């Protein structure tokens, strides 16, 4: 007689610089782990189909949809969420640019956009407008009409380039 | 002036608390069992298996709700918390499962077995209006029942509401007209898609109910919950933290009764959330079939308009009777129309219930009305802008008898649009020629071979602002800083920032010294709604009044401390003076002052509580006298500390807006929509690209220009979504695209290639400093303008939105025939 498939598993990972070791149900998503188990509610969930980008977090530097990634798959990885971007009171340049460019209204999409922009600028520090538009096209915003967001990411790119 | 958003830090760091983030101790989770039929009798619900599932606390159906008021609906109380006896649309809540975790609730919901006895499904308005099958067998309307001026139809013939507006004799005038132009359009069923989908957390306890939800109108929700749960208003607490988008789609009562009933049944705080599919089953906007007939005389002046509006309102009325009434008012446009008849019907259908959505009936009606003006211009051989100019109302003209005269200059708005569109076209052509490069010019021509261009303008005027009922409270602390309490909900529009700016200006303090919290009916004062673009105007007036009241109270306190009559105390320059102190230095009683940047240090006159017996200043930035002797008088903080005899205490001001004074005449303001678009159409694919979008924010005064421009671009973008992509598609009983993959909303790379955002500030509004509202205006004319521009590009007038590539390609084929 074979043992029933385990419904929970231990995951060990590093989230925003903090070591996490937890027994999680295998069906638990990364978004659920962050929001419901760890209280990191900055990561939002909306479409649940990987088209809106609201739930974007970085896993080993790569942007992933946390609503469609299983928490157990985080084992051995390093996760960065919007809460982990600032250094103390100092915001990440992308966060600053979103504030300066008035690139948010309701703010629900903002963490996802910011994480995607961080991923873009980590991968392409000198991203041009076409790259910004291509990378950010996978995130939806219903309030702003996008133009200020595009501006914010472009401004962040130029500021980070100058540093 | 533009101040940075006060919520920006919270929102970029992920710390902002939204309704969906709310938790309560011992909270349980709900999953909703939804109907798998569009129209059927419920013959049985078997919940035994679900009740036995792990973690399940309760499985609730309509029969469990006992003597709870089971139906809600602020206009027509036709909406059961859980379906009673029959279901009326696919996705209607039938039962709710409460369990320890969301997963357990969702798993158990799969184990609730529902038996149906099918009825014919009436999934569009034409079918429903022609059918003998009734969606609602009974009328829920009480005699004399009214919401605002809307008395719901008491019929059961699949009509949720019927209304009309008429003057003159439209039929006779049309018969006598030199030219009659008729237009019929279909406005799609669209979904607001606020990215934070509907959710509610409820905690029922004996004698009290606490709800945290995504409600735009917490006080409206409180009223319905109090009625349903037989509680005093004061015992119902509705708390609304930040909301992840609203756009009208979160108006009135949605999930709150379901969460409250689940909490009542389970004896625990219960949270109900929705995914996008469930959100689409909760509310959408009214679809509309609209026919406009316009008669013109020989000089191309309108002699009559006859308009027929047929709404697809879905299974429950929600706010659609009011949306229909507003749609009627907004259907004929800001034109001189001597003879008018508008008839509207909102039909019940077996689809998701419709309600408010940004624009509130204006986009539906303007699609036909403004497209009709373009078709007429074509027929009459007149430029479409010129045809509009010839018929536009002037400032001060009557739009609807008995309502506020037009408080806007539409001809000037139109000039601004045409200027921007011309400039873009000129620069594009100049760029090609200036290249001096024959190859580039050839390429440009080659590219243009497969491209057709069209441009169009459209204008709308909406009776906005809703009911002018608002209260605000300002609490000034012992250091002179201020807590502003209002029940406006912050859903992204920036109301907390704009209202703080108004309070700061009135109280001569810096914006950083004004804190604005979330709406919470236990603590924040009454507010009618957050909608109809009303907050800056109507709530802004309440904030001004509260600040004036605060200054009066400070004068009383200062007089008591000094032992002088209150009339001997005056407010000037953000300070409180004994009259004798300033009689030699101050002239210009009641002069307002723009003190922004001066942080209330006494430079510039106080905008409120002017000299003498509390006459309120206008806040206009005209010739403010300077009080040079800043040592004279007391700061408000000093007045407070002196009166309390300690470094402690606070003084409160309360402001009220009702149908009186600046808002005696309705609407509080006419919200203008004025846009222009240039589009290009790819002949091979039918794909439409928006080359240029021009919006004019005719807002009287922009309290915060960045916020107004943000509203305009956001609203216009949602209009582009309706024009080009968005449509809920029913195939038989079921919605076929209940997700964001197949329900396509505008994406970043869809943004217009050029955007021109104009602010027209003519000080012609009834709000603070001459302000009028923004938020809906820039959406309203966009679907019509895009339809007209595409029509000009392809040579055939569209009749149906969205203008997807297949639809446009079909138009192109028609044009060739």
Image (cartoon, helix red, strand yellow):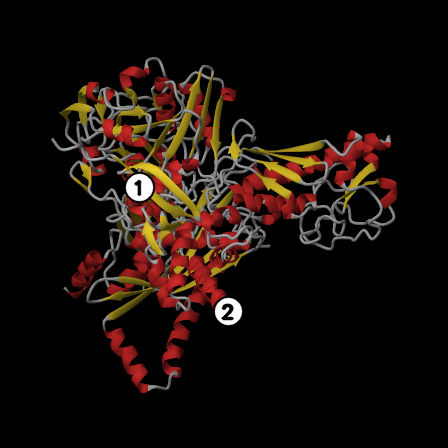
The residue nearer to you, when weighing B449 against B551, is B551
Q: Where is residue B154 shown, x and y percent of the image?
A: 32, 24
Q: Secondary structure at mark 1?
A: loop
Of the two numbered discs 2 and 1 on the same chain, state the one appearing first in sequence: 1
Q: Does residue B404 appear to the left or right of A35 in the view shown?
A: right
Most extreme residue toward the left, as rendered?
A1
Query: Can you say whether B774 is above or below B112 in the image?
Result: below
Q: Does residue B61 appear to the left or right of B24 in the view shown?
A: left
Name the residue located 78 percent from the left edge and 36 percent from the top edge.
B639
Q: Where is residue B83 shown, x and y percent of the image?
A: 26, 23
Q: Which residue is mark 2?
A: A162
Q: Does residue B478 appear to the left or right of B680 in the view shown?
A: right
Name the residue located 69 percent from the left edge and 36 percent from the top edge.
B477
Q: Where is residue B228 shown, x and y percent of the image?
A: 40, 19
Q: Where is residue B559 shown, x and y percent of the image?
A: 82, 32
Q: Which residue is mark 1?
A: A29
The residue nearer to you, when weighing B125 against A71, is A71
Most extreme residue toward the top, as rendered?
B67
Query: Can you say whether B224 is above or below B712 in the image?
Result: above
Q: Is residue B286 visible?
A: no
The residue nearer to you, when weighing B287 against B604, is B604
Q: Secondary structure at mark 2?
A: helix
Q: Which chain letter matches label 2?
A: A
Quadrant including the N terminus of chain A: top left
Mark 2 neighbour class, 10 Å CA radius: few under 14, some 14 to 19, many 20 or more: few
Query: Can you say whether B796 is above or below A83 in the image?
Result: below
Q: Is residue B718 visible?
A: yes
Q: Which chain letter matches label 1?
A: A
Q: CA distance from mark 2 to mark 1?
A: 38 Å
Mark 1 neighbour class, 10 Å CA radius: few under 14, some 14 to 19, many 20 or more: many
Q: Does residue B346 appear to the left or right of B633 in the view shown?
A: left
């Amino acid at each position: 007689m074979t043992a029933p498939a385990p419904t929970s598993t231990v995951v060990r990972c590093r989230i925003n610089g903090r070591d996490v070791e937890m027994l999680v149900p295998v069906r638990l998503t990364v978004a659920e782990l962050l929001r419901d188990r760890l209280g990191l509610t900055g990561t939002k969930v909306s479409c649940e189909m990987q088209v809106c980008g609201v739930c974007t977090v970085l896993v080993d530097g790569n942007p992933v949809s946390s609503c469609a990634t299983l928490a157990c798959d985080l084992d051995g990885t390093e996760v960065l969420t919007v809460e982990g971007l600032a250094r103390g009171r100092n915001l990440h340049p992308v966060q600053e640019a979103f504030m300066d460019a008035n690139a948010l209204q309701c703010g629900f999409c903002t963490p996802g956009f910011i994480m995607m922009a961080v991923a873009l600028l980590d991968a392409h520090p000198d991203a041009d407008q076409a790259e910004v538009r291509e990378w950010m096209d996978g995130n939806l915003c219903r309030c702003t009409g996008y133009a200020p967001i595009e501006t914010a990411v472009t401004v962040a790119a130029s500021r980070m380039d100058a540093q | 002036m533009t101040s940075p958003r006060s919520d920006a830090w919270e929102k970029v760091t992920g710390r902002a608390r939204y309704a969906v983030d709310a938790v309560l101790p011992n909270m349980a989770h709900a999953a909703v069992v939804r109907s798998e039929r569009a129209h059927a009798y419920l013959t049985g619900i078997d919940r035994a298996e679900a009740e036995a599932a792990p973690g399940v606390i309760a499985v609730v159906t309509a029969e469990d709700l006992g003597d709870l008021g089971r139906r809600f609906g602020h206009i027509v109380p036709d909406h059961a918390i859980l379906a009673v006896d029959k279901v009326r649309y696919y996705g209607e809540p039938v039962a709710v499962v409460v369990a320890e975790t969301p997963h357990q609730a969702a798993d158990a919901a799969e184990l609730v077995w529902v038996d149906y006895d099918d009825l014919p499904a009436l999934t569009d308005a034409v079918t429903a209006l022609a059918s003998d099958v009734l969606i609602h067998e009974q009328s829920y309307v009480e005699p004399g029942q009214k919401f605002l001026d809307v008395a719901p139809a008491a019929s059961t013939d699949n009509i949720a509401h019927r209304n009309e507006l008429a003057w003159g004799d439209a039929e006779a005038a049309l018969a006598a007209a030199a030219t009659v132009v008729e237009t019929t359009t279909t406005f799609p069923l669209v979904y607001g898609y606020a990215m934070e989908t509907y959710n509610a957390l409820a905690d029922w306890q004996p004698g009290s109910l606490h709800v945290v939800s995504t409600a735009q109108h917490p006080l409206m929700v409180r009223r319905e919950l109090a009625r349903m749960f037989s509680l005093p208003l004061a015992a119902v607490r509705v708390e609304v933290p930040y909301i992840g988008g609203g756009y009208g789609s979160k108006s009135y009562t949605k999930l709150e009764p379901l969460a409250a009933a689940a909490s009542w049944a389970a004896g625990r705080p219960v949270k109900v959330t929705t995914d996008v599919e469930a959100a689409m089953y909760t509310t959408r906007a009214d679809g509309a079939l609209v026919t406009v007939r316009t008669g013109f005389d020989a000089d191309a002046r309108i002699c009559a308009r006859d308009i027929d509006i047929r709404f697809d309102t879905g299974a429950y009325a929600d706010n659609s009777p009011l949306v229909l009434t507003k749609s009627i008012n907004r259907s004929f446009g800001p034109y001189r129309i001597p003879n008018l008849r508008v008839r509207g019907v909102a039909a019940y259908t077996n689809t998701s219930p419709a309600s408010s959505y940004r624009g509130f009936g204006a986009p539906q009606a303007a699609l036909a009305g403004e497209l009709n003006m373009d078709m007429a211009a074509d027929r009459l051989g007149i430029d479409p802008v010129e045809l509009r100019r010839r018929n536009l109302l002037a400032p001060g003209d009557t739009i609807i008898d008995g309502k506020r005269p037009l408080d806007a200059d539409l001809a000037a708005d139109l000039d601004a649009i045409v200027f921007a569109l011309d400039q873009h076209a000129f620069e594009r052509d100049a760029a090609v020629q200036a290249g001096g490069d024959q190859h580039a010019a050839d390429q440009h021509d080659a590219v243009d071979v497969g491209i057709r261009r069209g441009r169009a303008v459209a204008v709308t005027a909406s009776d906005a602002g809703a009911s002018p009922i608002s209260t605000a409270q300002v609490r000034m602390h012992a250091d002179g800083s201020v807590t502003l309490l209002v029940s406006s909900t912050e859903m992204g529009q920036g109301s907390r920032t704009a209202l703080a700016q108004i309070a700061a200006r009135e109280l001569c303090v810096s914006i950083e010294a004004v804190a604005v919290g979330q709406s919470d009916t236990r603590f924040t004062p009454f507010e009618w709604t957050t909608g109809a673009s009303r907050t800056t105007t109507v709530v802004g007036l309440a904030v001004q009044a509260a600040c004036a009241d605060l200054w009066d109270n400070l004068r009383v306190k200062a007089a008591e401390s000094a032992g002088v009559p209150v009339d001997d105390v005056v407010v000037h320059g953000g300070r409180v003076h004994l009259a004798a102190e300033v009689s030699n230095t101050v002239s210009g009683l009641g002069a307002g002052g723009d003190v922004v940047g001066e942080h209330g240090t006494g430079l510039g006159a106080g905008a409120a509580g002017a000299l003498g017996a509390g006459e309120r200043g206008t806040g206009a930035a005209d010739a403010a006298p300077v009080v040079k002797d800043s040592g004279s008088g007391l700061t408000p903080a000093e007045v407070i500390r002196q009166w309390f005899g300690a470094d402690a205490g606070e003084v409160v001001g309360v402001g009220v807006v009702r149908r009186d004074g600046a808002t005696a005449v309705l609407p509080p303001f006419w919200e203008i929509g004025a846009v222009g678009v240039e589009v290009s159409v790819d002949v091979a694919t039918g794909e439409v690209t928006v080359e240029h979008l021009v919006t004019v924010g005719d807002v009287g005064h922009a309290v915060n220009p960045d916020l107004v421009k943000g509203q305009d671009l956001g609203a216009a973008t949602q209009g582009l979504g309706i024009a080009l992509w968005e449509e809920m598609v029913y195939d038989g009983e079921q919605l076929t695209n209940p997700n964001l993959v197949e329900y396509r909303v505008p994406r970043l790379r869809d943004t217009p290639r050029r955007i021109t955002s104009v602010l027209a500030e003519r000080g012609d509004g009834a709000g603070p400093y001459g302000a009028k509202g923004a938020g809906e205006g820039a959406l309203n004319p966009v679907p019509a303008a895009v339809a007209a521009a595409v029509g000009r590009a392809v040579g055939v007038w569209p009749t149906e939105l969205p203008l997807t590539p297949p639809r446009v390609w079909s138009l192109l084929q028609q044009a060739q025939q």
